[in-house]
Image (cartoon, helix red, strand yellow):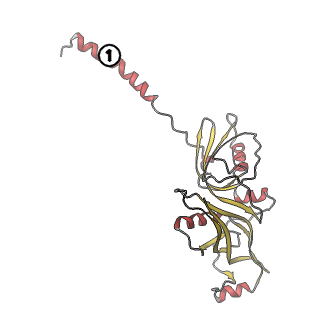
Amino acid sequence: MRLTIRSWCGLVFLALLLPACRTGGAKGGPASPAPPPDFLRSYEGSLRVLRARGDERAITARAGDRWAGECDVAVRVRSVAFEKAAARFALDAVGTPKVGARGVKCKRLEPTIQLALTGFPAGAAESAVSSRVDELLPTPEAYLRAKGTPFDRAAGEAPSEVASQQPDANEAERRLARAVVAWPKPLLSVDPTFRDPAKKVRYQGLIEIEAVVGSDGRLYRPKVKTTLEPTHESAVLGALPFWRFEPARRADGPLGARVPLQLGFRVY
């Protein structure tokens, strides 16, 4: 096949244009955040307490910063990303914690919070990064320790037998109740909060629930006794995994107990 000068020049032009197009295409659009290291990925879905600054929508914390504030917030880690040497946490607020009867003070409530941890030197050890994360986002157990209340009970399973003094308690529950020398005592509780998407509903009041406090000091089989809309009931139930108790006791040690509980609930 014979090529004319015009067609030959066209082929040369295309040959020069294609690499340029590929190069230009590589520059299109922002780069996606790098996936987090494995040790940071383990935080996704975990229950934590954001210290001091839970009333801020976006927080940047540099290595060595000292935080001050009274607004601690119970959160669930929705996602973690790693971008420009910063660990970025997307947090969903669950509610406000109380240690015993001591609550927190927040200027306002934020349903979602973005937390960026920056300032780590290149090649920082995993332990150094994890230590900083755990300082600002402690587990419920670590939060209790920081507040002066040790809690070292490992998570167990829902008890098969429980003591109860409830009006509907069966004979087995009543028999165990007669041996109880101390009933459950709340150490850490969380009052749930919920942001109404339409910003039309406002509510603040006490909610009645019933649950089993296991010998491990955690709640099992919770039931909301107050009539609520499904989304509000879901918000209430979502706060209960944070709760920690001194479990019921009889002479030979702790046991499960079915008890009534009250918690504050705020829709804003």
Front residue of 68/257: it is 68
In this view, the residue farthest toward the right is: 148
Front residue of 160/21: it is 21
Left or right: residue 215 versus residue 31 is right
Q: Is residue 222 above or below residue 199?
A: below
Amino acid of disc 1? Phe
Front residue of 198/59: it is 198
Q: Quadrant of the C terminus?
A: bottom right
- Residue 251 coordinates in the image, percent (x, y): 80, 81
Answer with the quarter of the image where residue 73 lies.
bottom right
- Residue 111 coordinates in the image, percent (x, y): 60, 53
Residue ID for mark 1: 13
How many numbered marks, from 0 up? 1
Q: Residue at x 62, y 60 (%)?
A: 193
- Residue 230 coordinates in the image, percent (x, y): 52, 67
Q: Residue at x 63, y 87 (%)?
A: 170
Front residue of 252/136: it is 136
Q: Quadrant of the N terminus?
A: top left
Left or right: residue 12 versus residue 229 is left
Left or right: residue 11 versus residue 126 is left
Q: Is residue 192 above or below residue 19?
A: below
In this view, the residue farthest toward the top is: 5
Neighbours of disc 1 within 10 Å: few (<14), some (14-19), many (20+): few
Answer with the quarter of the image where residue 6 lies.
top left
In this view, the residue farthest toward the left is: 1
Q: Label 1, secondary structure: give it.
A: helix
